[in-house]
Image: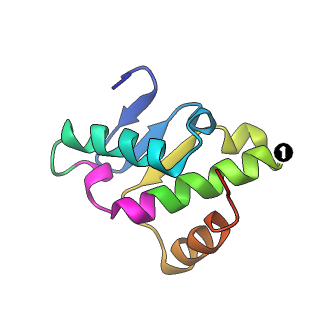
Amino acid sequence: MDSDRIRLTKENTHVFDSYLIRSKEDIRAFLEEIREQSDPDMAIMQRTLNSLIAEWRSHNLFYYLHVFRSRTKDVDLERTQSWWRELFCRVVSFFYFW
């Protein structure tokens, strides 16, 4: 795991330049590696992998569509997510084809 690419806290996991990791399999592998090395009370441990992957993929989709690129080049995987944001990310990530 490249510690220069992530910032872990109890409330958030920030992945710098997350758009560089494109496929669902690579995103999953990256998240699993982070989770293996994280304490149980860290934000990355509080949500399901599928939820984290959907949010990441929705960020990637918007980045590659040139929507708010300065905000979508990184991903913030917060400890909790509202139900409507979770739903939005799951629907949007469906349209991300990498």
Q: Residue 61 appears at what percent x and percent y?
A: 71, 53
- Left or right, 58 with reference to 65: left
Residue drawn at x 45%, y 51% as measured from the top left: 77
Q: Quadrant of the N terminus?
A: top left
Residue drawn at x 25%, y 44% as measured from the top left: 35
Residue drawn at x 31%, y 51% as measured from the top left: 43
Q: Nearer the viewer, residue 94 or 39?
A: 94
Q: Residue 2 appears at what percent x and percent y?
A: 38, 22
In terms of secondary structure, what is the magenta stretch mainly?
helix
- Left or right, 51 with reference to 36: right
The image quadrant of residue 30 is top left
Q: Residue 32 appears at what percent x and percent y?
A: 30, 45
Reading the image, the residue beneath label 1 is: 66
Q: Which residues are magenta?
A: 42-52
Q: Nearer the viewer, residue 27 or 38?
A: 27
- 93 in magenta: no
Residue type at mark 1 is His
Specify few, some or many for label 1: CA neighbours under 10 Å numbering under 14, 14-19, or 20 or more.
few
Q: How is the image coloured?
A: rainbow
